[in-house]
Amino acid sequence: FAFYSADGINWHCYDEKNPIFKYEPRKFGGHMLDSQNTVFYSEYEKCYVMYLRVWRTADGLKGLRSFAKSVSKDFKNWSEPELLQVNQPGEHLYVSTLAPYPRAPQYYIGMPTRYFGNRGSATDVTLIFSRHGKGIQRPTSTAWIKPGLAPDRWLNRSNYMAWQIIEHTPEELIFYHGPQQ
């Protein structure tokens, strides 16, 4: 469902009977739209862009968490989600966090959480890029942000990035990283 607000405090649903995006677990391998999905208006693509969590990889493997892309000109009618080629073999990716890079909005940067069920549901963060919203590139197949030395960072789903890099000053970009609460 879509919500809107004039002041960022009081929110209203566009249409309480009809969601703007349909939940189709059979088509996408299981649960979808059940985590941090991102939506933004792309100045470069001249449309709204949604990156959503699905349970099917681009090569058709079911049972692996991944994400897909859907676009809309009016925020009400969305394209069929396109599965993205981003997972390494056997890899679960929880959320994409893809968003326009503040200093070059034709580039999207994401810091997806990788999930390891065989390691007590531990998580780490990798790095991805998309140029012009076409395809996904990964500079490394390993973690960009590792759990580190603190034991609590190795617990179930303990490493997540907040959505979007923020331009704090002309010289400084910031992002937020922390455990799921």
Image: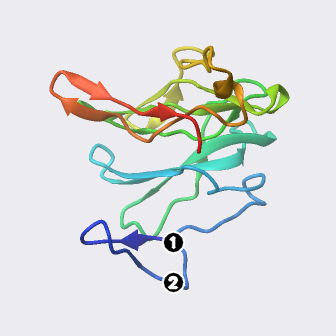
Q: Residue furthest bottom?
A: 17
Residue type for callout 2: Glu
From the top left corner, tell me how far across and down residue 26 is, in percent: 78, 60
Query: x, y (%) of residue 118?
Result: 84, 28
Q: Nearer the viewer, residue 12 or 131?
A: 12
User: Of helix, strand and loop, which one carries label 2?
Assistant: loop
Q: Is residue 88 left or right of residue 11?
A: right
| Residue to which mark 1 is pinned | 1
Quarter occupied by residue 147: top right
* Residue occupying the far left of the picture: 170
Element assignment for label 1 = loop
Sooner in the amino-acid sequence: mark 1 or mark 2: 1
User: How far apart are the alpha carbons under marks 1 and 2?
Assistant: 7 Å
Q: Amino acid at mark 1?
A: Phe
Q: Where's the C terminus, which quadrant?
A: top right
The reply to whether residue 102 is in sight is no
Taking 74 as reference, is 129 above or below it?
above
- Regarding residue 110, the answer to whether it shows in the image is yes
- Residue 112, horizontal then vertical, whole percent: 56, 33
Q: Nearer the viewer, residue 165 or 23?
A: 165
Residue 71 placement, left or right of 124:
left
Q: Are marks 1 and 2 in contact (CB under 8 Å)?
A: yes
Residue drawn at the location 80% of the way across and 39% of the way down = 61
Please give the residue where the numbered disc 2 appears in the rendered image. Answer: 16
Residue at 61% x, 43% y is 67
Residue 99 percent coordinates (x, y): 40, 40
Q: Residue at x 30, y 36 (%)?
A: 166
Q: Residues within 10 Å of mark 2 (few under 14, many from 20)?
A: few
Residue 43's label in the rendered image is none
At x 32%, y 69%, the residue is 9
Residue count near mark 1 (Cα–Cα under 10 Å), binned few <14, some 14–19, many ≥20: few
| Above or below, comparing residue 81 to residue 142 in the picture | below
